[in-house]
Amino acid sequence: MEHNLVLYNTLTRKKEKFVPIHPNLVGMYVCGPTVYSDVHLGNCRTFVSFDLIFRYLVHLGYKVRYVRNITDAGHLEGDNDEGDDKFAKKAKLEKLEPMEIVQKYTLGFHDVLRMFNTIPPSIEPTATGHISEQIEMVQEIMKNGFAYEVNGTVYFDVDKYVKEYNYTILTNRNLEDMLNNTRELGGQDEKKGRLDFALWIKAKPEHIMRWPSPWGVGFPGWHIECSAMSRKYLGDQFDIHGGGMDLAATHHTNEIAQSEACNHTTPAKYWMHTNMLTVNGARMSKSAGNGFLPGELFTGNHPLLNRGYSPMAVRFFMLQAHYRSTLDFSNEALDAADKGYKRLMSAIALLDKIAVSGKSNFGNLEEIKARSYAAMDDDFNSPVLIAELFEVVRIINSLYDGKLTITAADLEALKGYVSDFVFDILGLKDDQVGDVDNMDGLMQILIGIRNEAKKNKDFVTSDSIREKLTEIGIQLKDSKEGTLWNKI
Ligand SMILES: [Zn+2]
């Protein structure tokens, strides 16, 4: 099938046809989490969105190298080289080593993303594992004349850079406005220009995470890690660079500047940004008290939530909105998504129970498929795809009821379609399946105890097990093959 994938490029502010730099290969870099606290839902949305993008590119047959970093050093509280080190501050608070903080929250991050059924990236490099690459890059930027050292700290020279390059290319802002809006913070007396940012920061004596460098003992600035690691694993130029839209103005703008100042070429061909989350229409934030964590959303253990939702229902909810639209969390919207997700999974479970017929009259699967691909080819438009899937749900239910008919070959094709679009591309799975597996193990234990009781002529116990199971909707059936169970 001929594909015409278009995606919205922040760099050009329009949808463009996707043409990878090297045929059939895609290099994709996504800014990962700063692992100093529990991953928040906004980040999860970003990573679920790029999981969808990754899955679709793989489905189309591209060999994708997906790099998503772990920021485990160098991230100060403010974006302008000011404030405490995030890891050191949390370490003090939790009475742990900074690297214990890193380990704890990296594991938590992986657990949550696994629950959301995201595929791990091909490479997940850490900032602390790439200090020498970052130092090397800073040296090259200095050699090219775009950075200067003051008292053990190295700053990027934005004034020099703007003479040759467009510093505001990503967000199309006016440089004058940017200058006027920049607060005077963080090494301001050392910086030559107000927009200059640190590439390498001199460590204060109490700073634990520190490394030797040509400029003395210090640590990398936050932005340099992504430029250094994307270059190392994807080359000077690669296809897609992504992240949350809050990263575009500073972090990504500085990444582009660093890479151009070092490699004399723009790092990524397409820049993709995911939109933010809101709760009942207001921006989700810790300070507003409406920032619940993924775990709280799964258990319902938060004052704003009426109940908990399964990770798959939440994933489905996220995919019902386009990644560039805001996504509003409310109990009503989550309930509706949960219902929709269950309707979809219930219909899919019926596929194995449909009686085949000599002819099909359910519609044209090729047309449904074409519309589904068209949705995904249009900047990964998952909500349009999901609307198409509900048309398929209607068809499956009618086939099961015998109101429509399908041949064996068409049923196989329909199953293939569901497998491709629901499981492979949207990355959904039936979250009941795991329960049934555990349930069967549990039932085998109960059946064993009942058989043991029967053997010992303890019919009070054996009958009691059977009756109590019937009460909760489970039927036991003794047969030649042993005792079978099913839900009534
Ligand atoms: Zn980054």
Image (cartoon, rainbow, N blue to C red):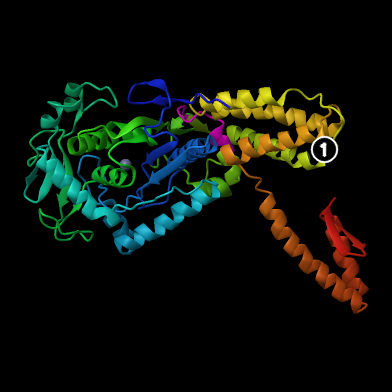
Residue at position x 78%, y 34% from top?
409
Q: Residues within 10 Å of mark 1 (few under 14, many from 20)?
A: some
Residue closest to the far bottom:
456
| Image quarter (top left, top right, bottom left or bottom right) of the N terminus | top right
Residue 244 is left or right of residue 280, and the answer is left
Q: Position of residue 19 (x, y in %)?
A: 41, 28
Q: Kindly indicate the quadrant of the structure image that contains residue 468.
A: bottom right
Judge whether residue 356 is colored magenta: no
Please state the total of marks drawn on the protein image: 1
Q: Is residue 487 visible?
A: yes
Figure quadrant, ligand 1: top left
On screen, 239 above or below 130? above
Residue 94 is left or right of residue 339, and the answer is left
Q: Position of residue 374 (x, y in %)?
A: 56, 23
Residue at position x 40%, y 55% from top?
105
Residue range (magenta): 316-326
Q: Taken as a whole, is the magenta stretch helix, strand or loop? A: loop
Circle 1 SS class: loop
Q: Position of residue 351 (x, y in %)?
A: 77, 39
In this view, the residue in front, 178 or 235, is 235
Quickly name the residue at label 1: 354
On screen, 129 above or below 170? below
